[in-house]
Amino acid sequence: MSKGSGLFTDQRAARPHLVRGGGGVAGEVADLRADVADEMEAMAAIAVEEFIDPPAADVDAFKASIASAATEEVYEGADLDGAVGEGVLDPPRNPTVTTSAHADIDAVTVVFEGKDINGDDISVNVLLTDGGGVTDVGAEALASVSKITVPAQSGVGGALEFGFGDVIGLAKPLVSRAGAAAVVMEIEAGTVLAADAITGTFVDAATSAPNGTYEPATVPDATNDYAVYYEWDAGND
């Protein structure tokens, strides 16, 4: 049976020689550390995150509208001419591609590359809908975008925009318990929602790297505030 969320598992002795041996000071220090680890084993690590006025989804935040192309196209640097461009998203959001309705829009996978909330490299795929006319979304959240790769399309008659959606990236790795994301409480646009009444959608870190995501039912619009309380994996932070 899995217990706790890894509290104390990443802690190491500042002076390792004091926890070696079975007697004296070393023995007492080693015993104390073992006692602390045992007591904390069954405890849950609870994170609290507050999101104040996150902006509304923006269909061309990274790159303004471009025509589809019959060859693979790569956009980076000055090509990322949207309002955010190569800037930082705080909190991280999921990338989107909005397309015009046209036969030249094919069911190909657009790849966004950039950094996640931890500053590590991440790539997020967005599968386009054949024929376009919709906004297709990625599942993971990016803190910044440095490169967008668009596979070849049928022709040049379609149009694409690249932005971000309503999904928010979490700061700590959200865990699941018994098959469900371990969310304790949600405050959504002024409404307090207990665990049995949560309306937002949560995806754990194992499914959506690096830490999982939160999509509020009342979508961000630069005026709504949110707070989420959830269990996180302190041993995998």
Image (cartoon, rainbow, N blue to C red):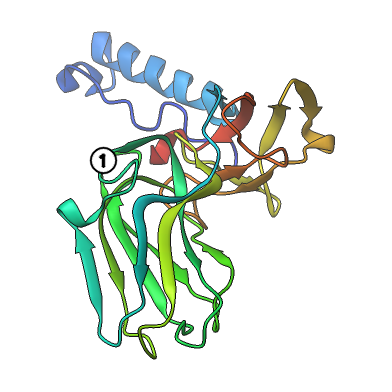
Task: Name the residue rendered at 62%, 23% in the picture.
Answer: 225
Single out the residue that lies furthest toward the top: 25
Relative depth, front residue between 181 and 45? 181
Residue 1 appearing in the image: no
Q: How crowded is mark 1: few (under 14 residues within 10 Å), some or many (20 or more)?
A: few
Relative depth, front residue between 78 and 2? 78
Relative depth, front residue between 136 and 83? 83
Relative depth, front residue between 39 and 93? 93
Q: What residue type is labelled 1?
A: Gly
In the rendered image, residue 136, in percent from the top left (x then y), is placed at: 54, 65
In the rendered image, residue 206, in percent from the top left (x then y), is placed at: 50, 55
In the rendered image, residue 196, in percent from the top left (x then y), is placed at: 84, 37
Check the image and report above or below for 69 versus 196.
below
Check the image and report above or below for 226 versus 232.
above
The C terminus: image quadrant: top left
Label 1 element class: loop
Residue 14 appearing in the image: yes
Q: Mark 1 points at which residue?
A: 119
Task: Name the residue rendered at 32%, 26% in the picture.
Answer: 11
Task: Name the residue rendered at 59%, 68% in the picture.
Answer: 134
Check the image and report above or below for 87 versus 226.
below
Check the image and report above or below for 191 versus 204.
above
Single out the residue that lies furthest toward the bottom: 154
> How many numbered marks appear?
1
* Quadrant of residue 119 within the rendered picture: top left
In the rendered image, residue 88, in percent from the top left (x then y), is placed at: 31, 37
Task: Name the residue rendered at 27%, 50% in the picture.
Answer: 81
